[in-house]
Amino acid sequence: ICIQQLPVDFVSFDAVKNKTVADLNWKVANEINVEKYIVQRSTNGVDFENVVTVNATVKSNEIKTYTATDFKPQVGINYYRIKQLDFDGTFGYSVVRMVQFDGANATAKLYPIPAQASVTLEIDAPKDGTIEYWTLNSTAQMNGAKLNQTITKGNNKITVDIAHYADGMYVLAY
């Protein structure tokens, strides 16, 4: 999880499996000086590639809704985020969402973002398994598992105390 002040306010961001494609929907507020939004995808939660670009609307303080579709998601878990780019070159990122495309229909939510004391992970798992949390160092390398959490097939809701974790970026893997 990367925490930084964004040049635009992301009101919401959802990524949903729709048969063989991923539908991405987001809402923003205070959209001033925004040139475009770039949907990015990763299969490891670290290395992101650009998938589709959506031009921003005219300067507005109203809530605006945007949609995009990833027509070629990868097999396995796809991590999605939105890169927001201003005309002056400044940029920021949305939260990351996961969609699975390996025949199993797993979905997950992590909230609140940003978080201070705890986060809640809701995951609808296609099978029993383990969630692992890693921290990333300054060169985006995984430093090893911080926590392992067993989950069961079906709906799981896990609250994790993060008060003792340092600020930084963390990766979840199932």
Image (cartoon, helix red, strand yellow):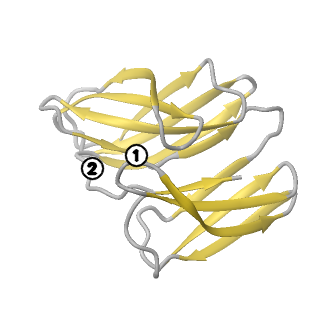
Q: Is residue 34 left or right of residue 138?
A: left
Identify which amino acid the numbered label 2 is placed on: Leu
Q: Residue 69, how many percent across, how many down?
A: 55, 23
- In this rendered view, identify the residue nearer to me: 1 or 143: 143
- Residue at 79% from the left image edge and 67% from the top image edge: 150
Numbered disc 1: secondary structure: loop
- In this rendered view, identify the residue nearer to me: 108 or 60: 108
- Tell me which corner region of the image, top left, top right, bottom left or bottom right, holds residue 138: bottom left
- Residue at 71% from the left image edge and 35% from the top image edge: 76
Q: Is residue 42 left or right of residue 152?
A: left
Q: Which residue is mark 2?
A: 6
The image shows residue 126, relative to residue 146, as above or below, that is: above
Identify which amino acid the numbered label 1 is placed on: Ser
Q: Quadrant of the N terminus?
A: bottom left
Q: Of label 1 and label 2, which has the lower sequence position?
A: 2
The image shows residue 91, relative to residue 150, as above or below, that is: above
Numbered disc 2: secondary structure: loop
- Residue at 41% from the left image edge and 37% from the top image edge: 82
